[in-house]
Amino acid sequence: MTKFHYFLLIGMANILSVFLCYVFLLKSDTVEGFDVRKHLSTVTSYAIGKELANDGFVSSNIPNGCSPIHLNLVARHGTRSPTKKRIRELDRLASHLEDLVNDAKDAAEKVPAWIRGWQSPWKGRKKGGQLIPKGEDELYNLGIRIRERFGDLFSEEYHPDVYTMKATQVPRASASAVAFGMGLFMERGNLGPGKHRAFSVTSESRASDLLLRFFDTCKTYKQYRENQEPAVQKLKEPILDQISSALVARYQLNFTTQDVASLWFLCKQEASLLEVTDQACGLFTPSEVSLLEWTDDLEVFILKGYGKSINYRMGLPLLRDVVDSMEQAIKANEEHHDPGTYEKARLRFAHAETVVPFSCLLGIFLEGAELVRLKHEQALELPPKPPQKRNWRGSVVAPFAGNNMLVLYNCPTKKTSNYYVQVMHNEVPVPLPGCDGSDFCSFEVFKEKIVNPHLQHNYNSVCSAKLEEPEPLSFSTNAVM
């Protein structure tokens, strides 16, 4: 071998070494930069969901001379503990993991250390589903920010008819309302060191709550959901099968698809509630997390979102209530009612099953020509599979404490209209297809383009209609009626 060939080989080896190091570092950066907490669908904490919602949309500049005169809020409860049913599922998982570890003695070195002797953090709990301190903070701080952002709206002395607060009868929703109110009215009273004040939160019976629990009162929807849930689970099966096979090969534990589903649930609870990301979440690769998140998002889309018109049309009483409150505020403004004699904010606290349909009624998260397809009763495609990008993500659509705000402005200097509506999702202005992609449009356009097409339908007729035979859900066509 000549000296030339020797140095040539050395040079090629160095280049190859540098290239391999670059590939390794690139892969490491990709994994290290992946934050599982941003991929938890509707179990995402509010701070992260709010951050994800900021997708670069440039909001409208509120014209000079415009001032807010009324605010509508529809909010989900804050972060909560697992329900009793889910607590039992995690207890069963602990028992099964112990059996799997005992059966895998020959491959003990591949078993993650945390699995050995693992017990659920909620072991022994007899009750669940309650708002946790993190959830209290989410709503408390939301109340503070809204008061700071819309100071003129919340400058009046408190009266329950000026600041109406409603919640469902589910304790985590009413507790969220209380936490929000404590932030909103902080230092407005004389109670304790924080100078808190008492305020009213009202609720309707679960059996008759058409505004905030329409999903419980709509017979047609309940039938639709019951029929579609098995089909949704069938859609998830190929992903769960694929990931369970990968986990078995990786850890030499005989995981079933049910184990994978339970471990994914545990991952979401640990990451969102406990800030633990290196146990259950650590079992999955970033690409597997993205696929599991996608299956959750599919379920939200099909059973709560744009997957079927019944999902959001059952929310018509809530939409009507929002518009009525705006019309009353406009009337009070036009008639120059005295301050403190009319409502300035209508604040509601409910569930993902409330916020998601209401977002759909507003047309949020639609892409391209989907609004036209909806108006013509045509099917929408399912959210595309990763790594394709998608607009529909549960972490943005309905994280814990996720909310929609509609702020009504009086703009006396505008020539086309005196009243305008700005729509915000998780406190971020969002484009509305019905308003030509703007977040700020006249009240007349808002009613004509967004509200009135829905009001052609009637809640009673929608929720008593005979359910059509569902078409099979399929990835091949990506269509869902």
Image (tube, rainbow, N blue to C red):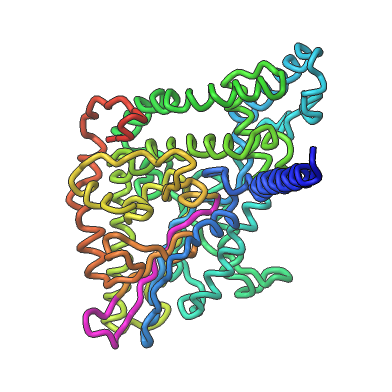
Of residue 18 and residue 129, the one placed in the foreground of this image is: 18
Disc tally is: 0
Q: On the image, which quarter does residue 414 sit in?
A: bottom left
Of residue 321 and residue 95, the one placed in the foreground of this image is: 95
Q: Is residue 136 left or right of residue 331?
A: right
Residue in view at x 33 percent, y 80 percent: 410
Of residue 326 and residue 165, the one placed in the foreground of this image is: 326
Q: Is residue 87 on the magenta stretch?
A: no
Q: Is residue 200 left or right of residue 310?
A: right
Residue in view at x 68 percent, y 52 percent: 133
Q: On the image, which quarter does residue 68 sit in?
A: bottom left
Residue in view at x 39 percent, y 74 percent: 60
Residue in view at x 25 percent, y 58 percent: 451
Residue 372 against residue 336 in the figure, above or below: above
| Spot occupied by residue 354 in the image (x, y as percentages of width and height) | 41, 47
Of residue 125 and residue 8, the one placed in the foreground of this image is: 8
Residue with the most extreme front position = 2
Q: Is residue 405 on the magenta stretch?
A: yes
In which quadrant is the N terminus drawn? top right
Query: Which residues fall within the magenta stretch?
Result: 400-419
Residue 103 against residue 40 in the figure, above or below: above
In which quadrant is the C terminus drawn? top left
Residue 16 against residue 48 in the figure, above or below: above
| Spot occupied by residue 128 in the image (x, y as percentages of width and height) | 63, 36
| Spot occupied by residue 231 in the image (x, y as percentages of width and height) | 38, 25
| Spot occupied by residue 253 in the image (x, y as percentages of width and height) | 70, 18
Q: Is residue 357 left or right of residue 26?
A: left
Residue 132 visible (yes or no): no
Residue 211 visible (yes or no): yes
